Image (tube, rainbow, N blue to C red):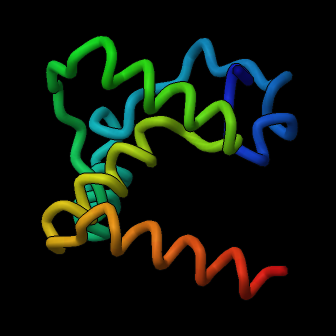
Amino acid sequence: MNNNSDPVFNQYVDMDFADAKPVSAVPALAALQAAQGGKSRITMRVDNATLAIFKARAEMTGRNYQTLMNEALQQFVQGKILADVIRETIRQELHHA
């Protein structure tokens, strides 16, 4: 698995962030982040097997496992069932072919 799945990682790999501050330590950035909404950092316990599956899928697709988990949670709260996800995936793949 890549150290970083971010496509622009290589642009910044040689930069020195040793003195970098977290967003919360810079009031203007913290306010901007809060205004944008977006995501919240949480701590959550997940079964090892479940985490391994998401990490394996992330490696296969070149994506981030946290993003895949977030998408799975979004699908759950939207009431999507596995059959819906499979149908949607097949339609997308047929459209790309």
Q: Is residue 23 left or right of residue 91?
A: left
Q: Is residue 12 left or right of residue 44?
A: right
Vertical arrangement, residue 67 with respect to residue 89, above or below: above
Please state, as top left, top right, bottom left or bottom right, where the C terminus lies in the image.
Answer: bottom right
How far across and down, in percent of the image, does residue 32 sit? 33, 63
Vertical arrangement, residue 19 with respect to residue 56, above or below: above
Vertical arrangement, residue 37 with respect to residue 25, above or below: below
Residue at 86% over, 40% down? 11
- Number of callouts: 0
Nearest the eye: 69 or 86: 86
How far across and down, in percent of the image, does residue 30 sit? 29, 50
How far across and down, in percent of the image, does residue 46 sit? 20, 21
Question: Quadrant of the rendered structure where residue 10 is?
Answer: top right
Residue at 35% over, 43% down? 69
Question: Quadrant of the rendered structure where residue 85 is?
Answer: bottom left
Residue at 56% over, 36% down? 57
Vertical arrangement, residue 58 with respect to residue 94, above or below: above
Nearest the eye: 20 or 11: 11
How far across and down, in percent of the image, does residue 91 sit? 59, 83
Please state, as top left, top right, bottom left or bottom right, where the N terminus lies in the image.
Answer: top right
